[in-house]
Amino acid sequence: MSGLLPDESNGEVAGGGASTSRADANASSSQQAPPSRYEAQKRRDWNTFGQYLKNHRPPLALSRCSGAHVLEFLRYLDQFGKTKIHAPACPFFGLAHPPAPCACPLRQAWGSLDALIGRLRAAFEEHGGKPESNPFGARAVRLYLREVREMQAKARGIAYEKKKRKRPGSATSAVAAAAAASTAASAAAAAAAATTSEGSGGSGSALSGATTSSSPSGLGDPHLL
Ligand SMILES: [Zn+2]
């Protein structure tokens, strides 16, 4: 069944598409405002993740969920992405507005993933999870988001400074701040890790790439600006 798709109508998972807030239909005592778009999106995200866990093989309980599982989830979401991310070999690599189509894959944009993780992280604790064991706050997730951010910035020629997407509550949190703090230095490293994948045997590719990308082996390509 395809009920797992994260609100594809709007493209990006975090886009906050047509907010069907039929859950509040019964709140006709309407003194309190209806949930914000952020709250509604957060609820949808949480449900989507719950569905993902439910369909996971082997089955996965929320209490056993780790950062690695969150990464798995994020990669799974990529197939529903709507953002063209050019491969380094693509002639349009680094162009924000390519003049022609190309065969590069569509992915979830970093901003979408970042906002999604922020919402899920909050939802986890609202559902009784302990901050210390919040898989959405795991270091591996933070590193992965940073790597995605840097790779997409290069691939799309877009610097993610304060690019305001249409998200209201701005769930960016400390993750974005931390990622913003270290940009250029490890961007080249991330790109190098992406292209020269000789180190890892290809087992846990993206994760191992994320963890090893801190060695600045590929400086010398100040492509970013
Ligand atoms: Zn391309």
Image (tube, grey):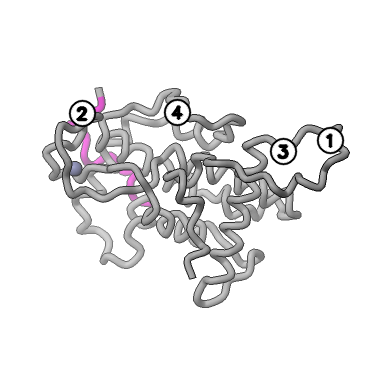
Foreground disc of the pair 1, 3: 1
Residue type at the position of mark 2: His
Q: Hey, which quadrant is residue 190 in on the image?
A: top left
- The question of residue 111 being in magenta is answered with no
Q: Which mark is residue 152?
A: none
Mark 2 neighbour density, 10 Å: few (under 14) some (14–19) many (20 or more): few
Foreground disc of the pair 2, 3: 3
Residue type at the position of mark 1: Ser
Q: Earlier in the sequence, mark 4 or mark 3?
A: 3
Mark 4 neighbour density, 10 Å: few (under 14) some (14–19) many (20 or more): few
Q: Which residues are magenta?
A: 211-224
Q: Position of residue 206 (x, y in %)?
A: 34, 56
Question: Residue drawn at (48%, 45%), measured in percent from left and top?
Answer: 142
Q: Which mark is residue 30?
A: 1
The residue at which mark 4 appears reads as: 181
The residue at which mark 2 appears reads as: 223
Q: Secondary structure at mark 3?
A: loop
The residue at which mark 3 appears reads as: 35
In this image, 159 relative to 77: left or right?
left
